[in-house]
Amino acid sequence: MQRISCIFWLGLKEMMSLRRDWVMMALLVWSFTLAPIMEATGVASSVNNASIAFADEDNSPLSRTLSTAFFPPEFQQVVQIEPGTGPEHMDAGRFIFVVAIPPGFEKDLRARRQPEIQVLIDATAMEQAGIGASYITNILSAEIYRFAAGVDLVDAPPVDLILRSAFNPNRDTVRFAGIVALIGQIMWLTTILTGAAMIREREQGTIEHLLALPLAPFDIAMAKIWANAAVVLIAAGVSLVFIMQGALDITIAGSKPLFLLGTALFLFTATALGVFLATIARSMAQFALLVMLIVLPMLMLSGGETPVEGQPAWLQAGTLFLPSRHYMSASQAIVFKGAGIETVWLEFASMAALGLALLITSLVMFRRSIARMS
Amino acid sequence: MNAKVTALEIHVADVTHRYRKQIALESISLNIPTGKLVGFIGPDGVGKSTLLSLITGAKKLQSGSIDVLGGSIDAPAHRRRICPAIAFMPQGLGRNLYSELSIRENLEFFSGLFSQGQDERDARIEALLSATGLAPFEDRLMGKLSGGMKQKLGLCCALIHDPKLLVLDEPTTGVDPLSRRQFWALIDAIRSENPKLSVLVSTAYMEEAESFDWIVAMDAGRVIFQGQPGTLKGNEKDLETAYRRLQAQGAPAITLHESPARQIETDPVITARGLTRRFGDFTAVDSVDFSIKRGEIFGFLGSNGCGKSTTMKMLTGLLPASSGEALLFGKPVDARDREMRRQIGYMSQAFSLYGELSVLQNLRLHARVFDLSDREERIAELTDRFGLTTHRDTLAAALPLGIKQRLSLAVAVIHCPRVLILDEPTSGVDPAARDTFWALLVQLAREDSVTIFVSTHFMPEAERCDRVSFMHAGRVLAEGTPADLIATEGAENLEEAFISILEAEEKPAPVVAPKVKMSAQTKRARASFGCAFAYTRREAVEVARDPVRLAFAFLGSAILMLVFCFGITLDIDELDFAILDLSQGPESRAYAAEFAGSSYFKPTPPLDSAAEGRSRLQAGDASLVIELPPDFGRKLRAGETTNVLATVDGAIPFKGETVEGYVAGLHQTFLDEQARNTGKAPVEIASIEPRFRYNQSFESIAAMAPAMPAILLIMLPAVLMAVSVARERELGSVVNFYVTPTTRLEFLVGKQIPYIVIGYANFLLLVGMTIFIFGVPLKGDPFPLAIGAFLYVWATTSYGLVIATMTSSQVAATFATAIASVVPTIQFSGLLQPVSTLEGGAQVIGSFWPSSYFLHLNVGAFTKGLGWEALAPDILALACFGPVLTLIAVLCLRAQEK
């Protein structure tokens, strides 16, 4: 009982200290307000404002119709270029897509000779290239089909494909990017706050002072963990309501308390990671470098930036050991798909298990580093 | 003496200096004679260091004027001219030295700063090392030297260029009395060799000042006396008493409680038997024995680093002993024994309370930790007794040093411990505050029978202890009451006794002045890059000896390259799909087979209902659900129009859209096959052929691997560069740049060169990984790429320099550089979104960002197979960034401290 009270009061001390550390406070405010807004509204991952050119050798009514079928925001104004100059333009990076229409295209079409349109795609523009290519193909087919139907060249296709985008009917990217950004900030900030608090204690020599009191290393670490986790949890909750729902107008399909429960589970992992890195690093600068090397990959591989399915199989198996991956997938299920505890319980359990393992490791490490100190 | 103004005299007129609102110096005016040993005396925080930094030009003058060596130190031209004539050794032993460098390397670096030739340098180093007795240790790292050796090395580094004015800020603080005495003998020898040399020195040891030619006594930012020591001393017994008489605040509030030591009881409270502590092969404490009785004040005397703190930590249980034992109340010290810790009060060397909490909050926190039942009464009692009542709500960080120490003591005794362990509690505190502090200690020992174990390097304090123990290099040399020790050694006072014990222990080297009469004077005519190379060499050695920075420099890029390339691939296949086949005919099975047979999808067990499909999508067990209506086969056979419902998990927009593309393609293939099988005309009337240029198979690795270096080669070199500059500022070694003739350009470029090399090595590493690990061939011309990469690394390290000039701490530099390099690179350089698709402002930023050009260059050379002609514009653009950014950094860098 006495120990719990010590941990509680030491934790309160953490919060009082944090309140006076204006650099960390500024980082905290920035991370949960402007940073996710910028990230969410910044880069759109699907096709957006793509540059497209037409090399039209046919110059028929049909080819002209085709060139007017591309609209913002997906595409920029179509630029007509000299036939044959497409590769040059692409080498210079001026266009991602060049549509080449052969001479006599409309005539060949009417004569059922199956003419061919070439779409040159700059495959180095990864995200845009793949989706953009299917956009362009669909737009061109639809236009050609409409034209063909108008002149009675074709029958209606026997099977209609009805495509539905579940959970995100408007293909809105802000919601996805916003929530991923929030999760990223939670990871960064928790690790940095906890680790920095730990190292500050060591650099200012107060850790020795604490250890000379009737406190165990466990009490000191736990106080930091609960206090920083609580601060981030509150900040995340506020950001969810006022920034995500308020400023970005994101609909949260599932239950907010469930999301925060998942966040709380994850925070124990992230704070334990902060303690762990702080015991390895000898100075604040080393800690900063380590955080970048560890947290950035954890975030990158969590499935937020790119789908986990894109990773090679061995890596997919490996990332199962990343709490960040479970947190990301549980959060996406709750926020986007409205999943309940019956769907995400396994992710929660994995997070708890991994977090506990990391916490125990870092506490053991911390105790050893105390013994090595001086 | 004041009247005789010579050209070389230092003339300070009406100088005021503030740190934010706090006044450090208040309208100081001084005339300092030349060719003399001039001492600045006073406790910590009276403005001595500020004044010395202003005189040497290390700090920028805020108001007033200072003339040094015949001109104003505030005039940049004069300052540059006289720089080679001034040597400055800042406060804090070895603060301007480099702990990762050996003694000789440190000296070589300083020699390089003054552009000395090889022969001159070797001759000077030889002379300095042999005169100071450091020659046998020339390869030892500075960080592993004892206090006395650091002090000598600092002096050698200051003397390497034959200065006319030598400024030493507290050179003897924390050094043992013997080393101190030798130091002053050395200074005397140098001065008699070099009569024109002026030496300005500050010290907190008043007794040292008696032998100075001229002293300046300071208190609270003002000069309270200047003149010969004899004048100040007058009839008082020593300078300290005289100084105190002059001080503004007068006598201490609490009078010394001089009650005689009571009959000390016999039961020992603290016992050490053969106590030893080793760190690796270094023995910090070597079989120390003592026993301290109840109510006794036991003094532990010794220089910094002699093992006092280590011994104390073993007694508190903070550190386990390597061998021997420590007993408290007759029981072995056990770190886990909470009850034992409740009996101990510990006050560590540095102020170790929470500066961001108020006095009251600090006391309350500790009262809570000790779970005191009468918290508020105890706090009220302590604040009253320790004179803290008026400061109750002040933040601890804002308290004057003397009051901070009283607060620390109050915290240490809040739980009424029976033993009090104090590690150098009064270092840096002014004499009056020290008296107050000792009055409290005596009261605790005499009235409350608290056993006090206190360490110090101040002799006047040691004289107040009941018994003292002399410690040196980990061993206890003598122990006894102060009076006994003085009598045994036949010395005048405790300091003399200590010195004679030390001399018996190790014969001191004879003191000689270094013979450095050189014909060649240090010249600065050739604007060579000598200084720059000195920085380059030093930086390279330091990085090579710092495992974390080295790992970050090389492993960092390799690890992140692997993670990014394996992790961020946009080729998604083998996606789980589930089908709800309500038709169950050959046609519907053919439709399902179309999906199952493609490499994009992987079948999962078929669905029984639409609701099940939804729940699979929700749980992420399927990315696509296809529903075939009951009459699918019948209608298809009858030539009627039917439909297929494909529901795609759109939660992740990129994935959703990719899946939609796959579905549309496979659907079309099914229709074509149906048409062919039924002999009808194909639905396709015109074909649309996508041609993926540069990367026919459209694997993301071919685009991703060459794109990654653009981000890695800005982030890592820029961060390392910024950390290296911020580190100099944080550790204080930047003062060498302030007070030596190094120009801003030399300083920055000199530090930059090793990081350009590291950056370039990283580039080659990444190229190797791209080709050999990720199997992406280099299709284009390697030469433009090689040149462009050099220019890019130059630009990115310069960018790190620009940010470093704007940040003050290493942590701020790391995070600021990371954010300021990664964010624009990801957003605006075309990494995710080609520059041609950016709009307005974003496109403008993108075209003023070096990564845009390097990205195009690297991807162009690797995947697009481009040559000189196509890559030349990128190279030209990249060539502009390095010089411009370096220039901006030079303009932003301050050549003096604010």
Image (cartoon, helix red, strand yellow):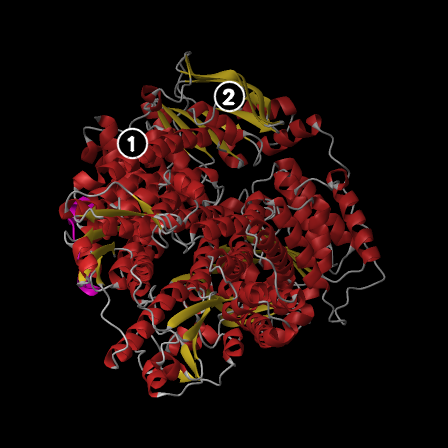
Q: Is residue B692 left or right of residue B259?
A: right
Q: Mark 2: give few (<14), some (14-19) or many (20+) Cα within 10 Å.
A: many
Q: Residue at x 76, y 71 (%)?
A: B526
Q: Is residue A10 left or right of residue A370?
A: left
In percent of width and height, residue B634 lies at: 17, 55
Which of B600/A248 is in front?
B600
Q: Quadrant of the N terminus of chain A?
A: top left
Q: Amino acid at mark 2?
A: Ala
In percent of width and height, residue B141 lies at: 66, 41
- Label 2 sits on a secondary structure element that is loop
Q: Chain of mark 1?
A: B
Location of residue B595 with respect to B822 vertically, above or below: above
- Label 1 sits on a secondary structure element that is loop
**Which residue position holds label 1?**
B414
In percent of width and height, residue B66 lies at: 57, 70
- Give the quadrant of residue A229: top left
Give the CA separation, mark 2 to mark 1. Answer: 28 Å
**Which residue position holds label 2?**
B321
Q: Is residue A369 visible?
A: yes
Q: Amino acid at mark 1?
A: Ile
In percent of width and height, residue B318 lies at: 43, 27
Q: Magenta part of the protein: which range?
A: A246-259
Q: Which of the two marks, 2 or 1, is nearer to us in this view?
A: 2
Does the stretch in magenta take in B888? no
Which of B598/B173 is in front?
B598
